[in-house]
Each structure stands twice: as C-alpha cells, then as structure tokens.
Image (spheres, helix red, strand yellow):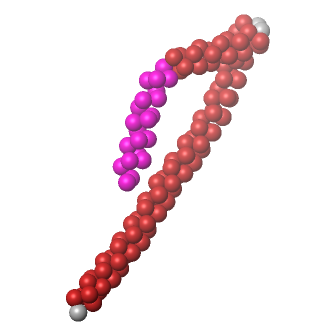
Amino acid sequence: MAFEEIKEQIDHVEDGVKSYVKISLDFYRLQSFRSMMKGITMATKVLLIAGVVSMALLFLSLSVAFWFGTMLDSTAQGFLIVGGFYVLVGIVLYLMRRKIEKPLLKKFSNFYFDEL
C-alpha cells in the first residue's frame, strides 16, 4: 500500500518535471525568437538608413570635389582635398575607436540581457 502511494507521488513529480521542461523550452524558444527578430529589424533599419546616408554623402562629396576643382582650376586637386578630408576623418575615428566601442558594447549588452 505504501509503495503504491510512493509510486503515484513519483508519477506526479515526473509529470510536473516534464511539464516544467516543456514550458521552459517553449519560453526560451519564444525569447530567442523575440531577440532574433528585434536584432533583424534593427539591422534592417540601420542598413536602410546607412544606404540613404551613403548615397547622400557620395553626391555631396562629388559636388564639393567638383566645386573645389572649379575654384582651383583643377578637378584632380578638388578630389584630392575631399579624399584627404575623408582620410583625416578615418584617422580620427580610428584613434577614437575605444571610446566608440565601449558605449556600443554597453548598449547591445543591455539590449540582449534585458530580454532574458
């Protein structure tokens, strides 16, 4: 008689554990899907905005280069000035990469770990 009660209790515990594992698995699937979709939508927005800004920057750079070229009577010098400006911007960004990296890492770690 006591063995049957223990067996029933073990069966209830086993059912509870199975239910808990299934619910936990479903929860983590949902959380991973949510994080993944949030990341994909963010990446899509960034790529779209970056594409538009890149096109605008390209046309502005070309117009400034031609403008400098007409001012200096040499199109090549106008393009060299604009190219030199971008090299300087690239050097400054390279030197500041640590200051840029830390806030990005903090923002994305908050984004990822706040989801769980």
Residue nearer the viewer, 61 or 8: 8
Span shown in magenta: 96-116
The extreme left residue here reads 2
Location of the N terminus by quadrant is bottom left
The image quarter in which residue 70 lies: top right
Dominant secondary structure (helix, strand or loop) of the stretch shown in magenta: helix
The extreme top residue here reads 72
Using the image, determine if residue 7 lies above or below residue 83: below
Residue nearer the viewer, 104 or 70: 104
Residue at 42% over, 72% down = 22
Using the image, determine if residue 15 lies above or below residue 85: below
Residue at 72% over, 15% down = 79
The reply to whether the magenta stretch includes residue 21 is no
Residue 32 lies left or right of residue 60; in this view the side is left
The image quarter in which residue 73 lies: top right
Using the image, determine if residue 42 lies above or below residue 60: below
Image position, residue 110 (x, y; %): 38, 43
Residue at 53% over, 21% down = 93
Residue nearer the viewer, 70 or 81: 81
Question: Quick check: can you spot residue 67?
Answer: no
Residue 54 lies left or right of residue 93; in this view the side is right
Location of the C terminus by quadrant is bottom left
Image position, residue 48 (x, y; %): 59, 44
The extreme bottom residue here reads 1
Image position, residue 95 (x, y; %): 51, 17
Residue 38 lies left or right of residue 66; in this view the side is left
Residue at 29% over, 86% down = 8
Residue nearer the viewer, 61 or 103: 103
The image quarter in which residue 15 lies: bottom left
Question: Quick check: can you spot residue 44?
Answer: yes
Image position, residue 19 (x, y; %): 37, 75
